[in-house]
Amino acid sequence: MNERSGPGISSAHRTAYASMLGLLDEALCEFERWGAGQSAKGVMYEEINDLTPAKQKELLAGIRAVRKTIRLLRDKLGLRPERSVVSHKVWVVCSGYWESLVELESAHMKRYGPLPPALARELDALATRVNTQFQALSTKVRSGEPSPRVEEDDE
């Protein structure tokens, strides 16, 4: 049975629209950061925000235009915005990187050729440490609440 909701569309249609528009708006949030002149800087990753003040202004105006259209679609289809809980997002990202970080251990790195044994032991200890520390980030921000989403009334 094809369940209908909204203006003559199925719940599957609504889910598809809501998912894509949510992802699009999430990307706009990052663009908005760049439009505000911000950039990320770590020890192995750095964003170079090369946007001039004029380009930042254009980007922010473009974001407002896209969001205006998203809002029209949201209202037309009766969609509810997805509210993402940061602690859950941290947990998801940490969980997603666990396997890749394990792959930094020398047993897995053999596919690129052998490592000197002493260096392999040292790198293994550091790879294990970074993985343990990274995974611990998720427990530091989790409040123990199992729900990854927050239900609230529309704006």
Image (cartoon, rainbow, N blue to C red):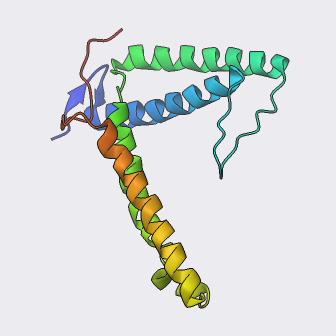
Rendered view: 122 above or below 146: below
Residue extending farthest to the top is 155
Q: Is residue 13 visible?
A: no
Q: Position of residue 93 (x, y in %)?
A: 41, 48
Q: Position of residue 12 (x, y in %)?
A: 29, 38
> Which quadrant holds residue 67?
top right
Q: Is residue 149 visible?
A: yes
- Residue depicted at 68% across the width and 32% down the height: 39
Q: Is residue 38 left or right of residue 105?
A: right
- Residue depicted at 33% across the width and 21% down the height: 80
> Which quadrant holds residue 86?
top left
- Residue depicted at 44% across the width and 31% down the height: 22
Rendered view: 101 above or below 108: above
- Residue depicted at 62% across the width and 14% down the height: 64
Is residue 141 or residue 88 the one in the foreground? 141
Quarter of the image with the C terminus in it: top left
Q: Is residue 30 left or right of residue 15?
A: right
Quarter of the image with the N terminus in it: top left
Q: Is residue 142 left or right of residue 62?
A: left
Q: Position of residue 54 (x, y in %)?
A: 84, 17
Q: Position of residue 143 (x, y in %)?
A: 23, 33
Q: How many marks?
A: 0
Rendered view: 66 above or below 12: above
Is residue 127 or residue 33 the one in the foreground? 127
Is residue 54 or residue 93 the one in the foreground? 93
